[in-house]
Every structure is written in C-alpha cells, then in structure tokens.
C-alpha cells in the first residue's frame, strides 16, 4: 500500500522512528493493567461479589500473551492487506476493545476485552521493529533493544497518571480491607478514557511520519547491502510464480512486495523443522526460569520478611534498568552476536535458582537474584529477535518471532499455577518454604536452556532453491572449467 503524506521530515529513517514512537505511545496506556488490577477487581466486585483480588492476577498474563500471539498475526495481515492497513487495523481493534471495556462490569468479559486489546496492540507494533531494522540491518540488535523496551518509560508515565486520576486523595486500603470503596473503584473508567485520546494520536503519527521501507529510502552506499538482504532467500520457483516477474528484478518496490510474498512460503518451510521448535523451547525455558522470580518476587519477598523499602527498590530498579539495559545489550548483540550473549546469560541465570534454594531467607541473596533475573529477561527480549533474524531473515522474523514469543509466554501460565500451588502449600500443608521447590525447577530449566544454546549455531537457514546458492554454484563451475 502506498501512503501519500506530507514530507514533514526529509530523512525518512528519522521520520519513521518518530512515527513508530507515536504508535508505541498510543498503546502504552494499556500496559499498567497489572498495577491497576486492584482497582479493576474492586470495580467488578460491585457487580459480581464472588470476584476476589486473585482474579486480577490473570489480567497481566492475558494481556502479555495476547500481545505476543498477535505479533505473528501482524505478519500474516501484512501479506494480505499491506503495511499501513495492518497498523491501523490493530489500532482500531484496540480502540473498540477500549470503548467496550469502559462500560463492562463482568470479570469474564473483562478477560475477553483485555485479550482483544492485547491483540490489537500486538498487531499494531508487530511490524514497527522489522520496518526500522530494514534501514540498518547491521544495527538490528540496538534497534531491537530500543523497540523492545521503549514502552517501559511510557508505561511508567501512564501508571503515575493513572494513580493520580483514580486515587485522587491518596486513599490506602485499611487493615483487613480487600477492595477499594465504590467512589474510587469507579474511577478506573476515567483512566481508560485516555485511550480515546492516545490511540488516535498514535494512528495520526503513524500516517504522518512512518515510511514503509524500500531501497529508495536509504543512502546509496547502503543500497547494495540492503538489496542483497532482500533478495537473499527468494527462490527461482517463487519468482516464476509471481505475476509480472519480468519487471521484478529491476524494480525495487516490486522487490519489497515479492519479499513479503516469499515470506509465506519460507515460514511454511521453517515451522516444519526441528530446529525452529528447539529454539522456541529454549525461549520457553529461559523465560520460565526468569518469570517465576519476577512475577512472584514481591509476594515471596513479603512472605520471607524482606522489608518494604527493599521491595520498592526492586520495582523501581526493574523499570529503570530495562530502559538502560536495552540499548547496551543491543549494542553487544551487534558486536558479539546474539547467540554469544544468549549463551552467557543462560549460564548466569542458573545462579539465582541455586542461591535461593539454599539461602532464600537472606535479603542480599534475594535482591541479587532478582537483579540477575531482570538482566536475563532483558537479554531474552533483546537477543532472541535478532537471532531469529540472523537465521531466517528480517521479513520472515515477524511471523516466526511471533510464534516464538507466544510459546515462551506460555511460561507465565506455569508461573501463575506455581503461585497458586505455593499459596496452597502455605495455607493447607504449612510447609515452611515451598518456594524452594520451584527455584530448584528454575535452575534445572536454566541448565537445559544453556545446554541447548551451546548445541545451537549461527548457521543461516537455507531455503529451497536459493538464487544466490545457484549463482555461486554456477560461478564455481565456470572457475573450474577456466
């Protein structure tokens, strides 16, 4: 789809960065849902008295899982309706879900709408990182690091704004008080009205500033490198099956469209391979090893007597460090390679599980382990995307990376199940430290992820009938004859 727009900024790469940030800003209001779950459940409890605070635990899980699953959908929609329509379609889904969310007061409908909004958000942002990476593929680690974590400061800002809107008088729950009073709970809807403002702003900025990549948008000195990447995995058979093939080789814009069409057949090839599912298993094992500590750390810390100031420090550190770690880790990915960094972190994250198994009551060990897991999560977010790009290609990474993220996010389900099991052990069986059982499990998962990563290589996947392979073979044959 060709989108005519006023040329506000001449440098199309810088313009695209600004437009992409606008889209991220437009959906960032959705992210503090885990912080606001206490207000959402208090509001729904007014209508459904069986709802307890535990129901709010699933909101963040549903949202993050839906966003990850929608990354793959974004790649599919792009092949069908185009780049810009995919972004606008995702924002439209998000806006409709947001409108209905304001008027609902049913926990099951709340779960459904949270999933719908997550899918809309995931579709909208699924193509942004890929599009930016096409401009400078040699910086894919740095770009992925920034794109993966850019919404953290946006979400922190919306979280502060939301608290000011909802709890306007600084009200705190009293002892033995589970839910917020009606006059506060109902104000959660005022916060979600922000979606009416920021979602359209995100769409407008996307229209005004984002340019879908094509070789004409880059400097001449980079053109040969970019064209090589775009053509790398296009098979001769696919070119013959593409309408208008006579004009493709010498037409850059058609080359882009051809690359998208080829991605369909490439994805079908890849998902049939054992290696792809092995990579998805690695991502699952790493995320499970990390997410149990991060998602249950606050509750666990309170149970073992970690003071409130230490817990607050970890929350603040989590927000700030992800912003700092992202670009730094992205730079290291570009310099040392994604696989190198993933191997290192897979070994390091074995340490927290071992330490917490034997010294879980010590505050220093708890804080140290939490920080290591935050670093591990940042490496997973920044490193796995570029690794998939290196192996399978940038265009293909949208769908394949989405599938990979969806599988890895299944670990959050096991985390929630683990939290419920731990709560049961405490309340029914009165075990002193049931968390120890789960930290042993996280160490085992970390060990196997490290083992699998050291088996893994940087070898690129060779698609069937690659024209570059054929050309190289012909050149070698000619050289031998000469």
Image (cartoon, rainbow, N blue to C red):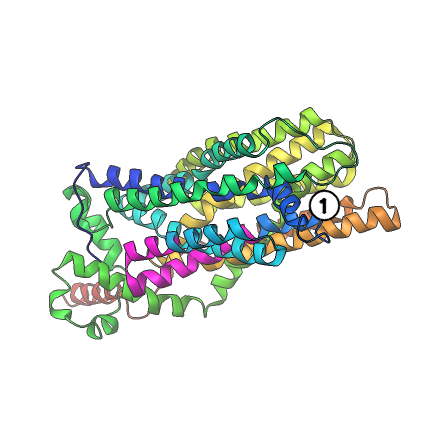
Placement of 170 over or under 133, stated as above or below: above
Q: Nearer the viewer, residue 408 or 72?
A: 72
Occupied quadrant, residue 357:
top right
Occupied quadrant, residue 394:
bottom left
394 relative to 286 in the view: left or right: left
Q: Secondary structure at mark 1?
A: helix
Placement of 73 over or under 174, stated as above or below: below
Extreme residue toward the top, this view: 309
On the rendered image, what quadrant is the N terminus found in?
A: bottom left
Residue 440 forms part of the magenta stretch: no
Which region is colored magenta? Answer: 62-90
Q: Badge 1: few (under 14), some or many (20 or more) residues near its Cα, within 10 Å?
A: many
Give residue 443's position: percent from left, percent from top: 68, 47
Give residue 6's position: percent from left, percent from top: 16, 42
Residue 176 in sight here: yes
Q: How many marks?
A: 1
Q: Looking at the magenta stretch, what is its main secondary structure?
A: helix
Residue at x 53% of width, y 61% of height: 278
Give residue 313's position: percent from left, percent from top: 62, 26
Residue 282 in sight here: no
Residue at x 33% of width, y 53% of height: 88
Residue at x 78% of width, y 38% of height: 358
Placement of 259 over or under 382, stated as above or below: below
396 relative to 446 in the view: left or right: left
Give residue 217's position: percent from left, percent from top: 18, 45
Residue at mark 1: 439
Q: Nearer the viewer, residue 342 or 131?
A: 131
Residue 63 forms part of the magenta stretch: yes
Residue at x 64% of width, y 48% of height: 56
Extreme residue toward the front, this view: 183
């Amino acid at each position: 789809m060709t989108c005519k727009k006023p040329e506000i900024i001449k440098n199309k790469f810088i313009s695209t960065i600004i437009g992409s940030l606008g889209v991220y800003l437009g959906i960032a209001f959705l992210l503090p849902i885990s912080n606001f779950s206490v207000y959402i459940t208090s509001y729904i409890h007014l209508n459904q008295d069986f709802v307890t605070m535990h129901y709010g635990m699933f909101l963040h899980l549903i949202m993050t899982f839906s966003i990850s699953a929608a990354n793959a959908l974004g790649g599919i929609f792009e092949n069908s309706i185009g780049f810009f329509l995919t972004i606008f379609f995702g924002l439209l889904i998000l806006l409709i879900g947001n409108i209905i969310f304001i008027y609902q007061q049913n926990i099951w409908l709340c779960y459904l709408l949270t999933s719908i909004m997550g899918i809309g958000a995931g579709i909208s942002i699924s193509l942004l990182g890929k599009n930016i990476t096409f401009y400078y593929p040699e910086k894919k680690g740095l770009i992925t690091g920034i794109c993966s974590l850019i919404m953290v400061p946006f979400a922190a800002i919306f979280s502060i704004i939301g608290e000011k809107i909802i709890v306007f008088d600084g009200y705190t729950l009293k002892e033995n008080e589970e839910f917020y009073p009606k006059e506060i709970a109902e104000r959660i809807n005022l916060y979600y009205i922000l979606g009416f403002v920021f979602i359209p702003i995100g769409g407008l900025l996307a229209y005004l500033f984002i340019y879908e990549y094509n070789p004409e948008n880059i400097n001449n000195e980079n053109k040969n490198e970019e064209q090589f990447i775009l053509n790398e995995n296009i098979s001769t058979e696919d070119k013959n099956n593409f309408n208008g093939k006579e004009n493709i080789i010498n037409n850059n814009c058609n080359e882009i469209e051809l690359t998208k069409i080829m991605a369909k057949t490439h994805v079908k090839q890849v998902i049939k391979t054992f290696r792809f599912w092995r990579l998805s298993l690695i991502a699952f094992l790493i995320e499970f090893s990390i997410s149990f500590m991060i998602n249950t750390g606050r509750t666990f810390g309170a149970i073992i007597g970690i003071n409130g100031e230490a817990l607050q420090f970890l929350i603040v550190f989590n927000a700030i460090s992800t912003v700092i770690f992202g670009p730094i880790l992205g730079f290291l990915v570009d310099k040392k390679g994604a696989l190198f960094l993933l191997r290192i972190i897979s070994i390091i994250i074995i340490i927290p599980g071992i330490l917490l198994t034997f010294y879980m009551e010590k505050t220093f060990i708890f804080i140290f382990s939490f920080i290591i897991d935050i670093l591990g999560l940042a490496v997973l977010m920044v490193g796995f995307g570029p690794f998939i790009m290196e192996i399978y290609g940038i265009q293909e990474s949208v769908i394949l990376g989405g599938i990979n993220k969806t599988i890895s996010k299944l670990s959050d389900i096991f985390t929630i199940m683990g939290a419920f099991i731990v709560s049961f052990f405490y309340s029914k069986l009165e075990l002193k430290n049931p968390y120890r059982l789960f930290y042993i499990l996280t160490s085992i998962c970390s060990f196997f992820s490290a083992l699998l990563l050291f088996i893994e290589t940087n070898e690129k996947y060779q698609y069937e009938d690659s024209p570059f392979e054929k050309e190289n073979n012909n050149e070698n044959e000619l050289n031998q004859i000469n």
